[in-house]
Image (cartoon, grey):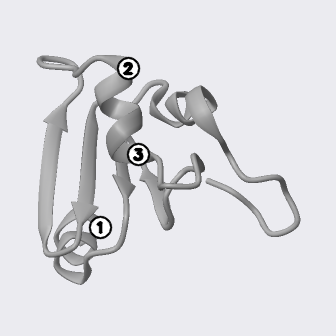
């Protein structure tokens, strides 16, 4: 979502990456969580807790493929989500 040389995405601005997205996948270590944003969207505060790192910036990597957003690194998640 961010190109080299641009400012990092911080705080509530991170929610903008979900605009138009149907699914969110979040990697936290070896665990992953999946949300169907159309059927059961968590609150903005819950989403920010998952999407932001301790610094308050959007966690890396954050990828968007079509209507899927993937936050955080987990090799299996990336492979299964991005196919």
Q: Residues within 10 Å of mark 2 (few under 14, many from 20)?
A: few
CA–CA distance between discs 2 and 3? 10 Å
Label 2 vs 1, first from the N-terminus: 2
Q: Quadrant of residue 11?
A: top right
**Image point (61%, 53%), residue name:** 1
The reply to whether discs 2 and 3 touch (Cβ–Cβ < 8 Å) is no
Question: Neighbour class for label 3 at 10 Å: few (<14), some, many (≥20)?
Answer: many
**Disc nearer the start of the sequence (3/1):** 3
Rendered position, 9 above or below 83: above
Q: Residue at x 14, y 60 (%)?
A: 32
The residue at which mark 2 appears reads as 44
Q: Residues within 10 Å of mark 1 (few under 14, many from 20)?
A: few
Quadrant for the C terminus, please: bottom left
Foreground residue among 45 and 60: 45
Disc on res. 82: 1
Tell me the CA gap for discs 3 and 1.
19 Å
Task: Label 3, secondary structure: give it.
Answer: helix
In-image side of 14 versus 52 (left or right) = right
Q: x, y (%) of residue 52?
A: 47, 47
Mark 2: secondary structure = helix
Check if mark 3's residue and mark 1's residue have beta carbons within 8 Å: no
Query: Which residue position is annotated with label 3?
Result: 51
Residue 17 lies left or right of residue 6; in this view the side is: left
* 3 or 1: mark nearer the eye: 3
Q: Is residue 3 left or right of residue 72?
A: right
Which of the marked residues, 2 or 3, is nearer the chain's N terminus?
2
Task: Tell me the SS state at disc 1.
Answer: helix
Residue 44, percent from left and from top: 38, 20
On the picture, is 76 further left or further right than 3?
A: left
Q: CA distance from mark 2 to mark 1?
A: 25 Å
Q: Residue 63: x and y, percent?
A: 47, 58
């Amino acid at each position: 979502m961010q190109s080299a040389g641009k400012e990092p995405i911080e705080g509530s601005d991170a929610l903008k990456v979900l605009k138009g997205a149907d699914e969110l996948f979040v990697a936290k270590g070896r665990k992953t969580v999946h949300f169907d944003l159309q059927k059961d969207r968590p609150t903005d505060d819950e989403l920010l807790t998952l999407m932001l790192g301790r610094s308050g910036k959007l966690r890396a990597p954050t990828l968007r493929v079509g209507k899927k957003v993937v936050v955080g690194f987990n090799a299996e998640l990336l492979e299964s989500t991005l196919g």
